Image (cartoon, rainbow, N blue to C red):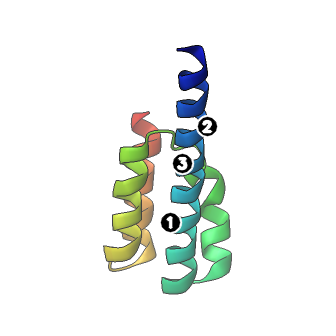
Amino acid sequence: MYESSIVQHFTERGQRQQGIEYVLDVLEIRFHPSEAETLKPAIETIEDLQHLKQLFRSAVQAPNLDEFKRTLTSMTNGQ
């Protein structure tokens, strides 16, 4: 039982890190690498995988970086 919770922890941790990288990649492609880099510390505070999924969707769909920042701010303030 203990072993499976360790495996689950590292699996979730890996998924979280991958999700963060995906969000940053999309921001770099859509906007500008330096802009994405400035948001990295805030994005890395997101722990919940569902929130990362929503953030990824926002990175893809937001009409501009300010709109993405609003989504990010609402998630980081709500945690």
Residue farthest along the top direction in this orientation: 1
Place of residue 51 in the rendered image (x, y in percent of width and height, measured from the top left): 38, 47
Residue type at mark 1: give it: Val
Q: Earlier in the sequence, mark 1 or mark 2?
A: 2
Depth-wise, is mark 1 or mark 2 nearer the camera?
A: 2
Q: Residues within 10 Å of mark 3 (few under 14, many from 20)?
A: many
Q: Circle 2 sits in a helix, a strand or a loop, which is it?
A: helix
Residue type at mark 2: give it: Phe
Residue corresponding to mark 1: 23
Place of residue 39 in the rendered image (x, y in percent of width and height, measured from the top left): 60, 61
Q: Which residue is rendered at x = 51% and y = 39% of the image?
A: 47
Residue corresponding to mark 3: 16
Q: Residues within 10 Å of mark 2 (few under 14, many from 20)?
A: few
- Per the model, the C-alpha gap separating discs 1 and 2 is 20 Å
Depth-wise, is mark 3 or mark 1 nearer the camera?
A: 3
Which sits in the foreground, 76 or 21?
A: 21
Q: Circle 3 sits in a helix, a strand or a loop, which is it?
A: helix
Q: Earlier in the sequence, mark 3 or mark 2?
A: 2
Residue corresponding to mark 2: 10
Q: Circle 1 sits in a helix, a strand or a loop, which is it?
A: helix
Residue 57 location, quadrant: bottom left
Q: Earlier in the sequence, mark 3 or mark 1?
A: 3
What is the number of the mark on residue 75? none
